[in-house]
Every structure is written in structure tokens, then in C-alpha cells.
Amino acid sequence: MKKTLVIQPGKMTLDEIRNIWSETPHLALPESAVAAMEASSAIVQKIIAKGDPAYGINTGFGKLAQQRIPDEDLEQLQKNLILSHSVGVGEALSAAIVRLIMVLKVGSLARGYSGIRPNVVQTLLDMVNADVIPFIPAKGSVGASGDLAPLSHMTLTLIGEGQAYYQGELMSSEQAMQKAGITPIVLAAKEGLALINGTQVSTALALHGLFRAERLFKNAVLAGALSVDAAKGSDLPFDERVHLIRGQPGQIYAAKLYRDLLAGSAIRESHVENDNKVQDPYSLRCQPQVMGAIYDLLQQASTTLLIEANAVTDNPLVFEGEAGEPDQVISGGNFHAEPVAFAADILALAISEIGALSERRVALLIDASISGLPPFLVPSAGLNSGFMIAHVTAAALASENKTYAHPASVDSLPTSANQEDHVSMATFAGRRLEDMAQNTSQIVAIELLCAAQGVDFHAPIKTSAALTRVHELIREFVPFYDEDRYLALDINALNELVVSNRLVDVVGDVLA
């Protein structure tokens, strides 16, 4: 039996959102949200009854806003809006991302500023709980005026059109809704526009990237600490005093992680005295400075994305009048996803740098002149190539990420006959983070293979207790590399450990 998580509109926490992304709890709305939506929907009905023109309620859209729509056509207007805007292309977004999109949209609409009936929002939530996942093509949004095309594909399923997955199987939306026992919605005035206008797709993609980056950060810290012992590096650069006098909070935090992970290492004790190395290469010595800066970026992005996850970003917005003042429908621009685009670009920099630093440590470990380890980390080098080409793969992935890291937010291409003349490109900014995260997890996996191999060459002297647990888990999946073998399988096995966060779990007390 799944636990029920009550969504508090406008007050969701990052932990709750992360839980929805990874654990699929049963979701519910509080009664207060129903009242707020009913009040907002009533305002829309009053506007229709009064006959005043209001954008998106009884007018056309975008450049067609001057076209007045008769009351008897308002339902058809909303359906036409969804059908005409469902123009996405490419592969489907993953179920985890689509689920997050739907929940963010529910949370936004439930705040009561969108003029939508409670049963529409509840139906969307019922779909999430029943594992009805709309087929949403990944491409086709510029991140303003909201994520129109992908959210239209989401809404298609809500009205019984298009395609959807039911419990993982792709079928028509009509079939999926029927199997789940959910009745499709006939959209009333304003409701289609409320559903497709907003930044929920961009935000969900960026949050997915954030959660992947958080895992990469910790796995890369593990790999970097293990590499320090593999290369018989010094732990003195992690001394707390060094970092306190600089004052960067992420750096101070990261240095502590390295100190804690390496504490009690017999390998380190074996070369404290008479060590002929004066200084370690930057990829070992400057890990707190680089990874600490990355951690600060992750914190900055998470702050922006949490605010956006709780935001009302559709248009127009419905406000109830106070103290005798009339109700108002205001056309604004909250659908412009510039904050999300900037946050996603920041995450792209962070993910790219995690991989770039990890790749440099792989290069260090296979170079006998720097690491002091056998060439390419294999006995009988020459007959065996060892990790030579594994490093080439890491280099290729790191280089690819550098191209992906180019900021998407600096681009803009006007759309809708120049009505939407500046756009954020936030949707691509968020979407490319998954490709970058996949690249970086493979790089970190290669480093973990190399670092574990390097530590083995120091046997019977052992690394720290924490890193020994990491090393032992690696060896459960991948044996010592004593001669050339099909190495891609080893990389894939370690990549699974990185993506699943299992390595971090075995030292959770240290990386809490």
C-alpha cells in the first residue's frame, strides 16, 4: 500500500518533489485547494455571463486575441486549442518526467488563480495515481508562452484524445482512461488555456537534471577520494583551515567530505613521511575548490526551481476582488521561463565540470609517470592495453558535454507572428541535462574502475573504512583487471551503481 502525500499548493518541498520523482507515492489535494479553485472558476463564469471580452476566456489566442468567440462555441474553442497546439515531435519524455509535469501542473492550478474547475484538476491527479502517463513528445517548446506543445499533449489524454501509457503500455488515451476507470473531461471556458500555459515541462526537466546532478556530485566525490588513495595523494589540501580562510561555503562543505571519506586510510599513513611528491596535480588537490563551487551552483539552481515548482505560471490570471473591488482577469507573463532557463544552464555547467574533473583523474591514474601505478593500470602492459581506451571514452564524453554546456538561455527566436518576440529556450535547456548526466555518470564509472584498480595495487595496505566499503561493492560487480577483457561490460555495471546511487548508500553516514 502506497503512502499518501498531500500536495500543499504553493508549499511543496524539494524533498516531496524528489520523492514524487523517484518513488511514485499516492497523491491527494487538501480541501482548501478545492475551495480556492471553485472561487476562481466562479469568476470566469461571471465574466462569461456579463459578456465582457477577456483574453483566453471568450477570445482567440495570441495574435488572434481580438477575435471574440460566441458563448456557444467556448467549449469547442478550448478543444480546438488543445488539438492545434499538440504539435510536439521526437521521442516521448520519460514516465518520471511526465509524472512530475502533471504534479507540478496540479499544484499550480490548485492555488486558485487559473479559473479552472476542481474536477478537472482532480482528474489530472487521478491519472497520476492510476499510472496513466500521457505520451508527450520531447521537442517543440521554446519556453514561452509556456510549454504549449508538450502541455497540450498532456491535456490530450485528459480529454480522451491522443496516446498514453497505462501501466507502462502505450495505447490510445481513450483506452488508457477506460482501463483506469477515469472519465475524460470536456473542457469549459479558460480551462484548456490554463492547462497548456505555464512552465511545468521546463521546470520538470530541470528538476530531473538537478536530481541527477545531486547524485553525480556525491558519486564523483567518492570517486575523487578513492583516486587520492589510488595515486597516493595527500590529504593536507583538505585541511579545514585552508578552506575556512577562503570562506566559500560549498568549498568548506566539500573539503569536509573528502576528509571524512579518507579518515583512517592506511594507504595515506604509509606515505606521510618521506613522500617525494611536493604537490599533487590539481585534479586531486583542488577537488574541494571545484566540487565546492559545483555544490554552490546546485544549491542556487535548487532554490530557483523550488520556487518555480510552486508558482502559478499560466495566463491570464484570475484575481478575486477585495473590499468591494471588482474581480480581475490580468494578462501577464509568468509563462516566460527565463528563471528556469538560467537554472538549467547553471546545472549544465555543474554537470559538465563534474565530468571534466573526473576525466582528468582518469588520465592521471593511467599515467605511470604521475600516479606511480603500473602503466594503464594493468599488469604486463604492452601485452595488455588496460584502461587506455576507457580513458578515450571518458575524454569523448567530457568533450561532448562541453558543447552541451553552451547556455541555451542566450538564444531566442521570435514566434507567433512576433507576438512572442522573446523566448527563454528553457525546455531545451532542461532537456539536454539528461544527456549530459548520462555522459558524466559514465565518466565517473570509468574513474571508479580505475581508482579501485589503483587501490588494489597497494594491497595488503587498505584505504579508509568508508572507502573500503565502496571498493568492496565495486568488486562485487567487477573483478580485478588482471588481463584484457570485454571492458564495456564493466563500465556499464559501474554506471548502474552510479545511477542507482548504491555506492553513496554504503557510505551514507559520511555523505549525509
Image: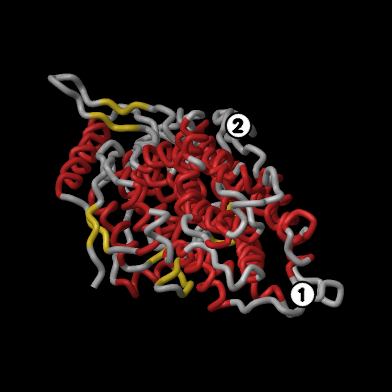
**In this view, the mark in front (1 or 2):** 1
User: Where residue 372 sits in the image (x, y, percent)?
Assistant: 74, 59
Where residue 77 appears, as percent x and y from the top left, is: 41, 45
- Give the image quarter of residue 9: top left
Residue 85 appears at what percent x and percent y?
51, 48
Q: Does residue 84 show up? A: no
Three-letter code for the amino acid on which mark 1 is drawn = Pro
The residue closer to the viewer here, 29 or 511, is 511
The x and y percentages for residue 104 are 36, 48
Work out how far the residue at label 1 is from the one at label 2, CA to CA, in angstroms: 66 Å
Residue located beneath label 2 in the image = 417
Q: In the image, which disc is placed on residue 379?
A: 1
In what quadrant of the picture does the N terminus appear? Answer: bottom left
What residue type is disc 2 on?
Ala
Query: Mark 2: few, some, or many residues within 10 Å (few <14, many ≥20)?
Result: few
The image shows residue 391, relative to residue 427, as above or below, that is below
